[in-house]
């Protein structure tokens, strides 16, 4: 059994702590750390496991973080706080000599842009320290990449067309709310779209392309083309892909609120002066929107996330749709969080389990699709995120 340290006590951190606590034969001790220790204590009390200890930490203070890691001496750090903090936490892991895992790639706080180049640049440093860093081990990115690797291994000789589809058909009862950190969420969905086609990136205007797609057990939903980070690593690691796109569902009401927020400047990330103080509009907006971890109480409905893939097997064209449907209500019953946090937190725990048990190992910086998908896929079925496969069907894309 191994010690593990979790950084972040939001909805995803709560799920990771719950799921790590379930794995009594894998994780011997769990340290849950966040800027606000009271949040960690609340989660510990809800789980009721003496193996969990808590601590306060500023994840941007590398020296303090190194000191805390060395004091607890875990096998690895699971980072589920903010993507702004990725590089500092990676550097702290290097200095303290522990493995690293996250669920979202780095983006600068002062620029609404995310890509893997900043984290991939640490590859040689992790190799030199005989350490492993696993990037993007949530659902998307994360499970969607593993779905792709699984399909490539079992159903295709070559993948040619990949469409990742993300539907949240839940209802939380609020006029407008985001399912994870509002600052990150709004930055993600308001930037320009981008997809891969014929060896190059094609840029689109935000929400320029929409298709009405049918989701299993849910039905038709308007799905919009946006850019999502796993596309970058997938087209690198599966070079036969001719086109890769990401689609996400948004209701008309959500998009109306989003346009108003943008039009009045509340989505801006540049500081402004208000009554003699510098404030960032989107950070103020975050403070007045519902806390994502509070949404689970009344959340009804399902999420449905998967990969629709077309390619070649034995010289013939074939299609494959791999997906998971997750109930917001069941997620809340189990962990006290809504489905979006659940679908991110469960894979983070599984990734950590893969690492500490040696089923996935290596030295350097990796994306999840670099490893054998089979043991991870087995864990998804037993840990609350069962998946389905449909072969040789109409993909609608």
Image (tube, grey):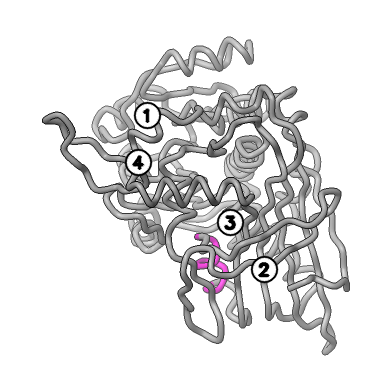
Label 1 or label 3, whichever comes before in sequence order:
1
Task: Name the residue tied to disc 4.
Answer: 282
Spot occupied by residue 362 in the image (x, y as percentages of width and height)? 52, 55
Residue 163: image tag:
2
Residue numbers of the magenta segment: 229-236
Q: Pick whichever, 117 or 273, lies toward us.
A: 273
Label 1 or label 4, whichever comes before in sequence order:
1
Label 3 or label 2, whichever comes before in sequence order:
2
SS for dot 2 = strand
Mark nearest the camera among 4 and 2 is 4
Label 1 or label 2, whichever comes before in sequence order:
1
SS for dot 1 = helix
Residue 368: image tag:
3
Question: Is there a contact, CB below 8 Å, between mark 1 and mark 2?
Answer: no
Mark nearest the camera among 1 and 4 is 4
Q: Is residue 82 magenta?
A: no
**Quadrant where the N terminus lies?**
top right
Q: Is residue 57 above or below residue 306?
A: above
Q: Is residue 201 left or right of residue 269?
A: right
Q: CA distance from mark 1 to mark 2?
A: 39 Å
């Amino acid at each position: 059994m191994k010690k593990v340290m979790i950084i972040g006590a939001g909805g995803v951190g709560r799920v990771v702590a719950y799921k790590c606590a379930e794995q009594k034969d894998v994780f011997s001790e769990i340290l849950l750390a966040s800027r606000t220790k009271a949040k960690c204590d609340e989660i510990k009390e809800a789980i009721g496991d003496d193996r969990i200890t808590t601590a306060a930490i500023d994840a941007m203070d590398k020296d303090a973080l190194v000191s805390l890691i060395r004091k607890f001496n875990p096998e690895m750090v699971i980072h589920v706080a903010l993507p702004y903090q990725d590089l500092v936490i990676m550097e702290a892991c290097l200095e303290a000599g522990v493995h690293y895992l996250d669920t979202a790639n780095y983006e600068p706080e002062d620029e609404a842009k995310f890509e893997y180049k900043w984290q991939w640049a640490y590859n040689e440093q992790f190799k030199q320290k005989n350490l492993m860093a696993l990037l993007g081990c949530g659902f998307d990115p994360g499970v969607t990449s593993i779905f792709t690797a699984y399909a490539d291994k079992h159903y295709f000789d070559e993948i040619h067309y990949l469409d990742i589809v993300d539907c949240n058909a839940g209802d939380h009862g609020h006029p407008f709310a985001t399912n994870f950190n509002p600052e990150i969420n709004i930055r993600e969905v308001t930037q320009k779209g981008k997809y891969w086609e014929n060896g190059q990136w094609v840029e689109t205007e935000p929400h320029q392309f929409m298709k009405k797609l049918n989701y299993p057990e849910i039905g038709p939903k308007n799905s919009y083309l946006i850019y999502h980070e796993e596309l970058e690593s997938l087209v690198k690691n599966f070079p036969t892909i001719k086109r890769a796109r990401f689609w996400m569902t948004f209701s008309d009401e959500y998009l109306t609120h989003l346009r108003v927020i943008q039009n009045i400047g509340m989505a801006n990330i540049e500081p402004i002066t208000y009554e003699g103080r510098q404030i960032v509009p989107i950070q103020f907006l975050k403070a007045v929107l519902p806390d994502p971890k509070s949404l689970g109480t009344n959340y009804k409905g399902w999420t449905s996330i998967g990969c629709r893939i077309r390619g070649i097997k034995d010289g013939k064209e074939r299609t494959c749709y791999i997906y998971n449907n997750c109930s917001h209500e069941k997620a809340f019953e189990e962990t006290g969080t809504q489905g979006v946090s659940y679908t991110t937190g469960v894979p983070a725990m599984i990734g950590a389990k893969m690492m500490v048990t040696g089923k996935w190992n290596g030295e350097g910086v990796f994306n999840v699709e670099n490893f054998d998908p089979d043991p991870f896929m087995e864990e998804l079925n037993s840990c609350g995120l069962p998946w389905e496969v449909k072969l040789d069907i109409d993909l609608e894309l």
